[in-house]
Image (cartoon, helix red, strand yellow):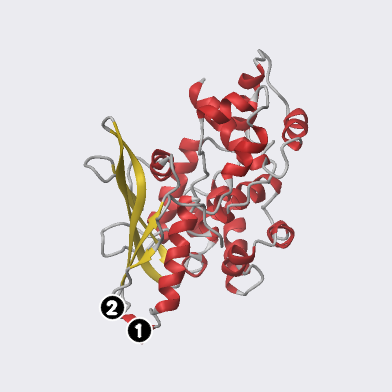
């Protein structure tokens, strides 16, 4: 997985330590939008699986999830650099992961896992996304260009794992964001294990398979969503969906075909999961209501913009259609 260019003279620094704790520092590109990362993980106001720290000189977040079968909590803190005239911006990130129950090399938590952790941190921050190339390519567009300039450096923050992104997309099908957040919270409470930090972990496929459809229904899922979640978890557990391998190699066609074979997963869910779970920036999110509303406002229309027109409009921006959709989400926020 490649990384975005950092500041001159900056380089990543591994700080792995014995036992169950991994550490690293990563350089950030100029103008990195730390607030976008915090906003993405602030979706649930009850903060049962994520905890946001806004106060103090180093804002950041704590995020708990099941990683490699163990309860893990990643801590990210943004360190600022002075730009002059009292202005600062994030220049590097300090990341740490505490893995409950691990005791270092004896449990396989050596150099390989340290490297995996650095990749995980880069992934969560969207540092592999080549947004600079997109901005250069479309800066002169009469409608999108001004939006790109207002959102310079916009990246798409990632879920910690592809499984989280796909299952979150399933939970969010055909309901409002607030309803989806509440449903996600109830799923975590029903299935998630507690990390030593006090946060509940977002479950992995194996954890989800510890419950049945009735338990998911009791947590608020429809029968269709319960079936889709369990179908996804079974396909991951039996190797039909090698999500970790796909994250490294990004075979988009294989990902689409594999996910489409799961009952209850359709094109919108796949494109959203590709964006939030794999960092793929070309899925067409024309079915997303917020994207269509953003396009309506960008075009200055009084009437809604339909899916077909949105799909056609986004097509001109391949291979960046999902990144354009992310910019259109900000039009909704500004509207």
**Which residue carries the number 2 mark?**
18
The percent position of residue 271, horizontal first and vertical second, equals: 66, 48
Q: Is residue 211 above or below residue 31?
A: below
Total tally of numbered discs in the picture:
2
Tell me the residue at 63%/31% (across/down): 139
Q: Residues within 10 Å of mark 1 (few under 14, many from 20)?
A: few
Quadrant (top left, top right, bottom left, bottom right) of the N terminus: bottom right
Q: Where on the picture, by quarter, is residue 259? A: bottom right
Tell me the residue at 39%/80% (across/down): 110
Query: The residue tagged with tag 2: helix, strand or loop?
Result: loop
The percent position of residue 299, horizontal first and vertical second, equals: 67, 19
Q: Is residue 89 above or below residue 201?
A: above
Q: CA distance from mark 2 to mark 1?
A: 8 Å
Q: Do residues under tags 2 and 1 come within 8 Å of each other at their CB atoms? A: yes
Whether residue 239 sits left or right of residue 80 in the image: it is right
- Examine the rendering and report whether any part of residue 52 can be seen: no
Q: Where on the picture, by quarter, is residue 252? A: bottom right
Whether residue 188 sits left or right of residue 144 in the image: it is left
- Examine the rendering and report whether any part of residue 268 can be seen: yes
**Which residue carries the number 1 mark?**
105
The percent position of residue 233, horizontal first and vertical second, equals: 57, 65
Q: Where on the picture, by quarter, is residue 202? A: bottom left
Query: The residue tagged with tag 1: helix, strand or loop?
Result: helix
Q: Which mark is residue 65?
A: none
Q: Is residue 94 above or below residue 211?
A: above
The percent position of residue 249, horizontal first and vertical second, equals: 64, 65
Seen as rendered, the residue at the extreme top is 302
Seen as rendered, the residue at the extreme left is 56
């Amino acid at each position: 997985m490649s990384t975005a260019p950092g500041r001159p003279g900056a380089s990543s620094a591994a700080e792995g330590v014995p036992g169950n704790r991994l550490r690293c520092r990563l350089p950030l590109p100029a103008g990195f939008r730390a607030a976008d990362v915090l906003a993405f993980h602030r979706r649930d106001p009850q903060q049962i699986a994520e905890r946001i720290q806004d106060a103090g000189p180093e804002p950041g977040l704590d995020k708990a999830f099941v990683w490699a079968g163990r309860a893990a909590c990643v801590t990210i803190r943004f360190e600022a650099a002075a730009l002059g005239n009292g202005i600062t911006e994030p220049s590097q990130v300090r990341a740490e992961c505490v893995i409950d129950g691990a005791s270092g090399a004896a449990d396989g938590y050596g150099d390989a896992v340290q490297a995996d952790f650095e990749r995980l941190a880069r992934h969560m921050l969207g540092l592999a996304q080549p947004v600079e190339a997109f901005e250069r390519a479309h800066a002169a567009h009469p409608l999108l260009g001004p939006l790109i300039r207002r959102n310079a450096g916009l990246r798409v923050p990632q879920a910690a794992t592809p499984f989280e992104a796909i299952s979150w997309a399933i939970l969010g099908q055909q309901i409002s964001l607030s309803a989806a957040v509440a449903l996600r919270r109830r799923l975590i409470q029903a299935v998630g294990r507690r990390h030593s930090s006090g946060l509940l972990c977002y479950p992995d496929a194996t954890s989800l398979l510890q419950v049945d459809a009735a338990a998911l229904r009791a947590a608020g899922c429809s029968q269709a969503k319960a079936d889709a979640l369990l179908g996804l978890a079974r396909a991951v557990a039996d190797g039909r969906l090698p999500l970790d391998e796909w994250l490294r190699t990004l075979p988009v066609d294989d990902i689409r075909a594999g996910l489409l074979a799961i009952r209850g997963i359709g094109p919108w869910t796949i494109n959203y999961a590709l964006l939030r779970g794999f960092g793929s920036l070309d899925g067409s999110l024309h079915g997303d209501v917020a994207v269509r509303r953003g396009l309506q406002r960008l075009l200055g229309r009084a009437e809604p913009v339909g899916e077909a027109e949105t799909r056609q409009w986004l097509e001109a921006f391949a291979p960046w259609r999902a990144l354009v959709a992310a910019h259109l989400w900000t039009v909704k926020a500004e509207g």
